Image (cartoon, grey):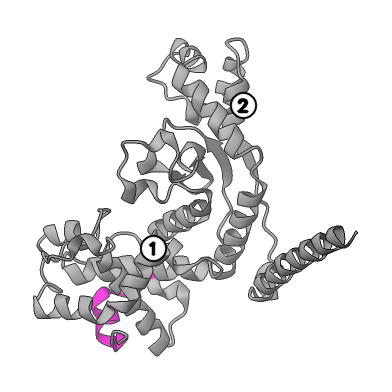
Amino acid sequence: MQHHFSRFLILASCLAVVFFASCEKAKSIPDEILKIPVDVKVQRFDQRFADATADSLPRLMRQFPYLFPGQYDRQFWEDRLVDTLQLRLNEEVAEAFPDFEAEAQDLELLFKHIKYYYPKYEVPTIVTVTSFVDYKNRVILNDSLLLISLDVYLGADHEFYNGIQKYFSQNFRPEQIDVDVASAFAKRKLGPPSGRQFIDEMIHQGKRLYLMEALLPLKAKNELMGYSTEQLEWAEKNEVNIWTYFVENEILFDTDPKLLQRFMNPAPFSKFYMEFDNETPPRLGRYIGWQIVRSYMEKNNIPLQMLASKSSDEIFKNAGYKPKK
C-alpha cells in the first residue's frame, strides 16, 4: 500500500510540474495575442496518398492538382503508389505523426503572433506531404498554401537520413517544423539583402532571426539557430573573439563570396582557418548579425514591422553593438 501511495505521489508531482510549466508558458504570451482568432486548417495529403488506389487516384489528383505536376502522367503516380520507398515513407510518417495536433497547436501560436504584428496576413492552408526526403525544401510557403514535408522531420538519427550531412540532419525533428515555417515567413517578408558586403548578409540574416524570435518567443534560441545547446553556448562564450576576428581581419565590408561559405551557409563548422575550426558551430556570421540587430532594436524605438525596410548600413551605424564579454 505504501509503495503504491509513493508511486501516486511521484506521479502527482510530475503532473503538477507539467501543469505549472504549461501555465507559465501560457502566462508568458500576452492575452491580446492569445485571443487573436486563427483558423488553422490541416489537410493530411500524406495520409490520403498512402490510402489511395489506382481507382481513387484521379479524384485525389483533381482535389490537389498543384501536387501532381503536369509533366508526369497518371501512370507515373500509379507506380508511385506501390513504390517500395514510398511505402516505407508512408509507414514511417504514419508512425511518427499519427496525428498532427501538437504541431498544429505550435503553428496556430505562430500564426497568432504573425497576425498580431501583421493583421492583414491571411493564414494559409496547411498540407502535409512526403517528398522523398527533399530536405532542401522542407516547407514551401506562398500566399495561400503551406506545404510541410513530414518525411524530413522523423528524428535526427532516422535511418532515412544516413548519408546526409549531420549538420543538416540534426534539425530533422518535429520541433523544427514551426521554426522552418517562421523562417520561410521571415524570408518572404524581408526579401533579399540590401548589399553585397559581408556585413549586409550578416545583418540580413540577423533580421531574419530577430523576426523569428519575435514570432516564436517560447522557442529556445538554439532551436532558432538550428544549433545544439552546446553550439549555442560556444557562440555565446566566444562572441567577443568572433567579432574581434571579423574586425581585425577587415572582412565586414568585404564582398568575397567565400565568406558566405565560411560563416553563413550550412556547414559542419565555421572556417577561421585556425586549429580549433572543427570545434566551432557553423554559421557564426548569422549569430553575430542577430546580436547586431538585437542591439539596434533595443536602442532604437522601431516597430517590428519596420525592421524589413531598414538598410544594413542604418542598422550597423545605429546598433551601438558591443559583444558580450
Q: Residues within 10 Å of mark 2 (few under 14, many from 20)?
A: some
Dot 1 falls on a residue whose secondary structure is: helix
Q: Residue at x 45, y 61 (%)?
A: 223
Q: Position of residue 43 (x, y in %)?
A: 62, 37
Looking at the rendered structure, which numbered label has been put on residue 225? 1
Residue at which label 2 appears = 48
The CA span between labels 1 and 2 is 33 Å
Asked if residue 267 lies left or right of residue 216, the reply is left
Q: Which residues are magenta?
A: 308-321
Q: How many marks?
A: 2
- Residue 243 position (above or below residue 224): below
Residue situated furthest right in the rendering: 1
Q: Amino acid at mark 2?
A: Arg
Residue 278 can be seen, yes or no: yes
Q: Where, by quadrant of the figure, is residue 49 drawn?
A: top right
Q: Position of residue 138 (x, y in %)?
A: 43, 43
Looking at the rendered structure, which numbered label has been put on residue 301? none
Q: Residue at x 24, y 63 (%)?
A: 279
Label located before the other in sequence (1 or 2): 2
Asked if residue 285 lies left or right of residue 191, the reply is left
Q: Residues within 10 Å of mark 1 (few under 14, many from 20)?
A: many
Q: Residue at x 41, y 71 (%)?
A: 210
For the N terminus, the image quarter is: bottom right
Membership of 135 in magenta stretch = no
Q: Amino acid at mark 1?
A: Met
Q: Position of residue 55 (x, y in %)?
A: 61, 10
